[in-house]
């Protein structure tokens, strides 16, 4: 979806803290029509991928100890024909999106087969089967069953609950649901539907409770796709005159939507994704995922899909009326037609969709220009020089990111605050430095959502009156919780990254990266993610969402 894909995934990549559970059970977990497993074929593929790229590649996600186990156990087979085959097919010189798609397609084939050494007529997959036989792959797999079980077991209760919810919402369910996952290779989550069974095929590794909840929603998302496909096949005409919702999102996120045709290529695919994600989150809430977590996820998704945030009440109403979504479809369509019209959909978007940090990068990618502005007002000249270095480091990182994702990058210009023209001010800007260092930040400071205040020393204060629909969340290893807007921001934080609509041209955006000091600014330049703002400290993590008209 967008840092664009990487940054969009950042809302699911609250996966970076803590340690994974360790349970001594088989890696396959079963309950009443649900099967969750680290699939042997997919993990065989992952092992070959680790060997092909010597344990270091964007798509390798296993913990270091596991990677070392792979490299040690399979050391005699590093030059096996199967390893060379994987290295050639998934060539590291390909753009990330191309490799991502190739890995997903290859994984779909593997996930639906029995264990490869037991299969026949495999074609080129016979290379993988031979490798598994020669290396005794299953001995390695069996030795790590407890690691796999620690990942699969906690998901079952949430997923089991979902079957009843599907029956209630759609009036039917499917024969069985299976999670076929890799523990150590990032496989883009996707759905395969075959012979009455719904398969989630993807990556499954997490380190804490918050990350586990993101997988619950991701799995439910894929499980929900076949239901929504059938729903839309029967009801699309009821909604097809509302494609203006998609056109508005394309207008606001032109780069993301251009490079993501699977979600934004047509109004049908857009509705499919809109309904699938909103229903998955609704079911997750019904099945015990904490309300604040679902609210957090919903806020982020509202920037990408209209009218995401309005749908939860519709599902509740259908439930209260004891109607399936098939029966409720005409009412839902009528309400969607009232929420926004072609004439006011832009105003509706600005009212309900939060601005998010990648907005400025998305617009810059579309328009072909981004200006990074560093401050020159710090009374200590070394502070100005440090911020200048931060600006150039960020410029280079963004160029590399654009090229890696899209194969092209906009013009990224670094300027000092004193040299900005009126035309520059109307574009997409990234401001480096707080109000002491950067004159543009100083001009904006009193009217931005998280402002700087001096109380003997510089501190951050939320400013909810500056925006609409301000919601703040505290993130820890095991929880995401709403926090009061009037609660103090801890004094020991690095700083803030926040997004606003450009006050000199509301079609464009300003991203402010500002630390309590120059070192905090440098640290915060690493935290551009898919939310309106983020505040970080050594032990403190706060994010929030707000909209701006």
Image (cartoon, helix red, strand yellow):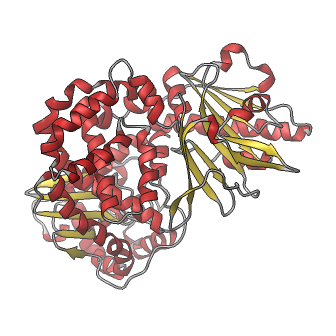
Residue 104 point in image, percent of width and height: 29, 50
Q: In the visual, does 160 lie left or right of 376? A: left
Toward the viewer: 126 or 232?
Answer: 232
Residue sitting at x 61%, y 40%: 397
Residue farthest to the left, as pictured = 195
Residue 22 point in image, percent of width and height: 42, 80
Q: In the visual, does 79 lie left or right of 105? A: right
Toward the viewer: 74 or 140?
Answer: 140
Residue 150 point in image, percent of width and height: 38, 76
Residue sitting at x 60%, y 32%: 500
Q: Is residue 172 above or below residue 409?
A: below
Q: Is residue 426 visible?
A: yes
Q: Is residue 239 above or below residue 299?
A: above
Toward the viewer: 448 or 64?
Answer: 448
Residue farthest to the front, as pictured = 321
Residue 331 point in image, percent of width and height: 20, 37
Q: In the visual, does 293 lie left or right of 393? A: left
Q: Is residue 473 above or below residue 549?
A: below
Q: Is residue 230 visible?
A: no
Q: Quadrant of residue 326?
A: top left
Residue farthest to the bottom, as pictured = 24
Q: Is residue 166 above or below residue 335?
A: below
Q: How many marks?
A: 0
The image quadrant where one finds the N terminus is top left
């Amino acid at each position: 979806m967008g840092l664009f894909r990487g940054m969009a995934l950042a809302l699911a990549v609250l996966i970076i803290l803590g340690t994974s559970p360790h349970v001594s059970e088989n890696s396959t977990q079963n309950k009443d029509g649900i099967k969750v497993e680290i699939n042997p074929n997919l993990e065989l593929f992952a092992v070959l991928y680790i060997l092909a790229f010597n344990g270091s590649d964007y798509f390798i996600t296993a913990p270091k100890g596991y990677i070392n186990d792979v490299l040690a156990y399979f050391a005699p087979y590093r030059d096996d024909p199967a390893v060379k085959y994987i290295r050639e097919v998934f060539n590291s010189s390909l753009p990330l999106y191309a490799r991502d798609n190739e890995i997903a397609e290859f994984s779909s084939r593997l996930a639906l087969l029995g264990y490869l050494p037991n299969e026949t007529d495999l074609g080129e997959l016979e290379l993988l089967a031979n490798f598994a036989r020669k290396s005794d792959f299953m001995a390695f797999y069996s030795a790590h069953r407890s690691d796999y079980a620690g990942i699969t077991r906690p998901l079952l209760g949430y997923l089991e609950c979902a079957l009843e919810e599907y029956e209630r919402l759609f009036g039917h369910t499917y024969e069985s649901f299976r999670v076929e996952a890799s523990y150590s290779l990032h496989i883009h989550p996707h759905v395969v539907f075959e012979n009455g069974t719904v398969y989630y095929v993807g990556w499954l590794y997490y380190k804490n409770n918050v990350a586990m909840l993101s997988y619950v929603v991701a799995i439910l998302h894929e499980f929900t796709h076949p239901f929504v496909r059938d729903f839309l096949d029967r009801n699309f005409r009821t909604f097809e005159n509302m494609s203006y919702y998609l056109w508005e999102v394309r207008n606001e996120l032109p780069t993301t939507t251009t490079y993501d045709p699977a979600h934004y290529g047509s109004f049908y695919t857009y509705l499919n994704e809109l309904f699938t994600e909103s229903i998955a989150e609704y079911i997750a809430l019904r099945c015990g995922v904490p309300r604040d977590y679902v609210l957090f996820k919903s806020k982020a998704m509202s920037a990408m899909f209209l009218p995401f945030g309005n749908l939860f009440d519709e599902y509740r109403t259908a439930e209260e009326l004891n109607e399936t979504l098939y029966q409720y479809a005409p009412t839902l369509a009528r309400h969607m037609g009232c929420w926004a019209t072609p004439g006011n959909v832009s105003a509706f978007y600005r009212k309900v969709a939060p601005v998010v940090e990648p907005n400025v990068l998305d617009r810059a990618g579309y328009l072909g220009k981004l200006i990074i502005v560093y401050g020159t007002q710090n009374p200590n000249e070394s502070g100005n020089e440090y911020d200048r270095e931060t600006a150039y480091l960020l410029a280079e990182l963004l160029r590399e990111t654009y090229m890696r994702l899209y194969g092209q990058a906009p013009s990224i210009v670094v300027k000092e605050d004193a040299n900005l023209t009126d035309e520059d001010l109307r574009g997409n800007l990234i401001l480096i430095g707080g109000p002491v260092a950067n004159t543009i930040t100083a001009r904006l400071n009193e009217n931005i959502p998280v402002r700087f205040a001096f109380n003997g020393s510089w501190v951050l204060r939320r400013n909810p009156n500056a925006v609409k629909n301000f919601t703040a969340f505290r993130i820890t290893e095991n929880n995401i919780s709403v926090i009061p807007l009037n609660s103090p921001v801890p004094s020991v934080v690095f700083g803030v990254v926040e997004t606003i609509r450009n006050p000199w041209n509301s079609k464009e955006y300003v991203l402010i990266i500002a630390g309590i000091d120059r070192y905090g600014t440098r640290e915060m330049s690493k935290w551009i993610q898919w939310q309106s703002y983020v505040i970080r400290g050594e032990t403190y993590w706060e994010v929030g969402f707000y909209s701006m008209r």
